[in-house]
Amino acid sequence: MKIMLSCALLFASAALAAAAESSFRTPYYRAALAPDQPGFTELAVDSLGKEKLAVNVMLPLTQNPRKYHTVRSGNSVEYHADGSGTAAWTFTFTNKAIVLRSEYSSQQPPQPLVFGFNPILCHATLLGLFDDSGAIRLPALLHFPDRGTFRITTPEKGLALVYDALRDKEDFVRVTFPPATAERPSVEYRWEVTAIYPIVEGIMNDPRYDGFRRDFLNILQINPRERVLANHAASDPVAFTVFLYSMMAAHMPPLADGLTALDIVRQTLDRYAGGMKGYGMANYKDDPNLKYDFLDTYPSLVMASTEYVRASHDRDWLTKNYAVVKRWADQMIAFDSDGDGLMEYPVSGNSGSWPQQISVRPSNWWDTVGFGHKDAYANALAYRAFNDMAELARMNGRSDDADVYAQRARKLKAVYYDTFYNPATGVLAGWKSADGKLHDYYFLFVNGMAVTHGLLTKEQGNRVWDKLLAKMKDVGYTRFELGLPGNLIRILPEDYADKNHRFGYSEREDGSDGFQVYENGGATACWAYYTIQALRDLGRDKEADAILFPMLKAFEDGGFQGRGPNGMTYDWKDWNGGPHGYEGLLVDGYSTLLAALPGGGR
């Protein structure tokens, strides 16, 4: 049935304007339809309705041998195949929604709608739950990071969308909508523009938080081939970042009727619990450089499991998976090779120990920097994870287990500060190598996480952050719209694991030519949350805001997504803003938005 809408009634201040015969625009989206086959030639979306619609997210339509002619009536466009009086597909446009309707004809059965999205411009993802065939059941969300979101629903039961994504050889994100069939002669899909974010009193009408409202969902990207949350839709699933997804999912309102972000996290945890390997796990994709599980892998999985159960109250999942999560926690204990309470990585981390041709990766997320042996970052995560595992054990009625993990947390905390504190600099070092040397490059994320997870007293934390902020001022880092550097001073070549200059290695002995490239002091949104939240926990709100608000503006402007003129991407930048990344979108950085929540979302 054609829907005829009154502009005066529905679009008094935001009228649909047809720039061409089949073009439509509202404050929330703009769309242009192909004249000879059902599909978009242009699509842009703005969940906040501020007409931020410059970027067309569509790939060119593939050539279709079947030709259609269009009939436009008001705000609807029908596509008719030759020889059929029935509209194969009808597109109807309203202020915040697009409705796609397919009608079956035995003369010309309608074809599926295949939408290809351009990940070079915007890393689209389809968020939902997989069925047994690998398609995503409806309802689902079609999300365009830094742009907006369509909630996709249907009155039909059992419909699912085919979803695929690929990078490098081809770059695409593709979603296929099944047409009407003889068995199901009419099918309808409703795309409704929505914005999904936690409601926080006092900031909802503050434009400084537009990036918070627009981008809170950016942390979630599903890789359709692995059926798991990943760096982005066509990138690797990463075991040591799952806890970031759960931290943010716990604060998201429902995505649609019967669908929550926690459901999507559970789907990912089920894959890992079932034995799937992600990056950071030994022998992932048979990579010879991944000889060992990273030290932050199992803390991440334990923390994510606890956050999921805590927020969802899904005790059945806990009962079913308790043994698996316990095994993850016990792997953390097994890494304590010398019995002091800290995990030790099997690689020494000694200066000069990294070969010219990389043969083994370091111990954590910062996988080009020479973290090894006693790793301050991974052990800060382990402290939180042991406490979380104790909580899970109590929930599951395992008081003896709870005592074991609580004791492990206390033992780790008792030695943490003395192990990693560097009296020469007044801050925590990144790692202590097997030869007893501290490796300290003023790592912001290490010191931020230590404060945020409660491993330092408030007095210790303030002393450390006095030194770090003074060093930041001394080295001249002020461009917080770029994010934060992981380290404030150059990492020397002997402490850099990946000897590729493109990833931050220095050919010069003083480390100067690799500094500010990628993980060697490059600016990123990743792990900035822990700096901002540490400052909040220490009562230093003014200093925290000085970092947060420029980053919120950059999120709103899409400053951490996309490709620069040099072919590299903006998820990593030098201190002048030049791109040095390769992912194009790295979801980890959007965890920074937690710092806008009261208590940092904890």
Image: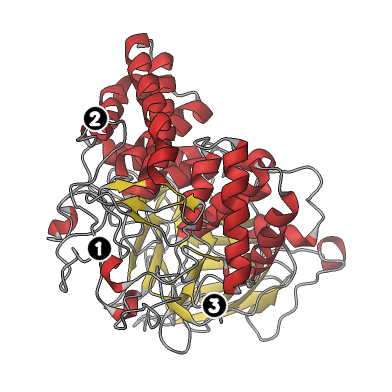
Q: Is disc 1 placed on a helix, strand or loop? A: loop
Q: Indicate which disc residue 575 carries.
A: 3
Residue 547 seen in the figure: yes
Disc 3 or 1, which lies upstream in sequence? 1
Q: Is disc 3 placed on a helix, strand or loop? A: loop
Q: Indicate which disc residue 339 carries.
A: 2
Residue 217 seen in the figure: no
Picture coordinates of residue 558, whole percent (x, y) = 59, 71
The residue pinned by badge 1 equals 351
Q: Residue at x 54, y 77 (%)?
A: 575
Are the residues at dot 2 and dot 1 in contact (C-beta closer than 8 Å)? no
Q: Residues within 10 Å of mark 3 (few under 14, many from 20)?
A: many
Given the current orientation, which residue lies at the most extreme bottom position?
565
Are the residues at dot 3 and dot 1 in contact (C-beta closer than 8 Å)? no
Question: Left of 453 or right of it: where is 520?
Answer: left
Q: Indicate which disc residue 282 carries.
A: none
Q: Residue at x 49, y 36 (%)?
A: 455
Task: Please determine whether, in this image, residue 119 is positioned above or below residue 309.
Answer: below
Screen quadrant of the N terminus: bottom right
Please identify the quarter of the rendering in which residue 461 is found.
top right
